[in-house]
Amino acid sequence: MKCRTCGKKASVNMRQHKLALCKEHYLEWIPAQAERFIEKYRMFTHDEKILVAVSGGKDSLSLWDILLRLGYAADGLYICLGIDEGIAYSFESQRLTEKFAAERGLKLNVVNVQQEYGETIPEFAGRSQRGKGKPCSVCGLTKRHIMNRIARDFGYDVLATGHNLDDEAAVLFGNTLTWSGEYLLRQGPVLPATPGLARKVKPLCRLYEREMLAYSLLRSIEYIYDECPFAEGATSIYYKELLNKLENDRPGAKLAFYLSFLEARKKGLFAEPEAIQQELHPCRSCGQPTSAPGLCAFCRMVKKD
């Protein structure tokens, strides 16, 4: 297989794009694609201050690397969740994130959940009605709260996450199975800012997980290989496996699924009914928008429900 650009031996073959590239041109192609999506969906400009949520994984660290290569002003945010069930997951992911930032002279904001709020994610989940013993829901709630707080308090214009196409397709698949209208309306490359909530963007939303894996390896980005120990048995992983089977038989199926959804939404197929609109007001404790009376879900959890 030869590189389409220069004719040398290809390092990466992308069946879904009918495209093969050598290392040099692949490492040029990925940032160029990300830039195209940033501009297409009007995510942000070079004049805006970007906060990248980094977990120590390949996607978020690669996103930070890509944005810097493209000349954007981007700082990082790492949230230490206190998940160290047998494999020191949080410790290792924080170590690799801090190493990535230090080697490149980058600014990294670090928030330690236990130090800030008194308990780790597993501890919150163990006593919370929301957690019911499994931390995923509590983890998502906590990360959303902290990401928005840091973006708001430190004056960032936009919050960028490393969600790739496989992530987006799996979420879309699950929401479509249950026709979760509110979630379908919110899914997309950009979630606009509203009073008290930062604009959220996903520059990698049209790039496959395998493409990001190849990019991180070819860029020699050191990342945590282990999955979160609580991810085992997660519905999202099951959906990814199903979609991978489809993709194997029909290369490009995941991308077509996601892009068709975006086009349908653009045409008004998922017009927002009044029934699912919620009136938001500031949380009495933290000030972040919430539809709940008094305290937001996060503050209720921190105050021991």
Image (cartoon, rainbow, N blue to C red):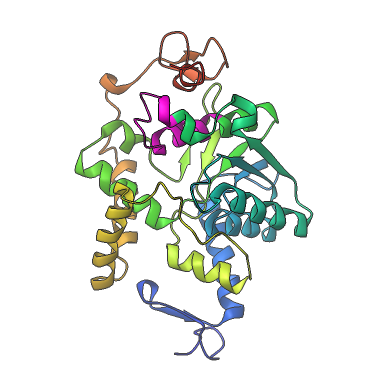
**What's the residue at 52%, 38% (across, down)?**
200
Q: Image height check: is 202 above or below 288?
A: below
Region rendered in magenta: 125-145
**Quarter holding the C terminus?**
top left
**Quarter holding the N terminus?**
bottom left
Q: Image height check: is 114 above or below 162?
A: above
Spot occupied by residue 247 in the image (x, y as percentages of width and height): 28, 67
Spot occupied by residue 245 in the image (x, y as percentages of width and height): 25, 66
Spot occupied by residue 163 in the image (x, y as percentages of width and height): 47, 51
| One can see residue 192 in this view | no
Q: Of helix, strand and loop, which mostly describes the magenta segment?
A: helix
Q: Is residue 109 a member of the stretch shown in magenta?
A: no
Q: Nearer the viewer, residue 51 or 275?
A: 51
**Quarter residue 206 falls in:** bottom left
**Quarter residue 100 falls in:** bottom right
Q: Nearer the viewer, residue 178 or 50?
A: 178
Q: In the image as oriented, which residue stretches furthest toward the front?
A: 86
Q: Image height check: is 266 above or below 72?
A: above
| One can see residue 201 in this view | yes
Left or right of 253? Residue 39 is right
Q: In the image as oriented, which residue stretches furthest toward the right?
A: 105
Q: Is residue 138 a member of the stretch shown in magenta?
A: yes
Q: Nearer the viewer, residue 168 or 117?
A: 117
Q: Nearer the viewer, residue 193 or 296?
A: 296
**What's the residue at 28%, 20% (across, down)?**
274
What is the count of numbered marks? 0
**What's the residue at 54%, 33% (across, down)?**
120
Spot occupied by residue 126 in the image (x, y as percentages of width and height): 41, 30
Left or right of 114? Residue 2 is left
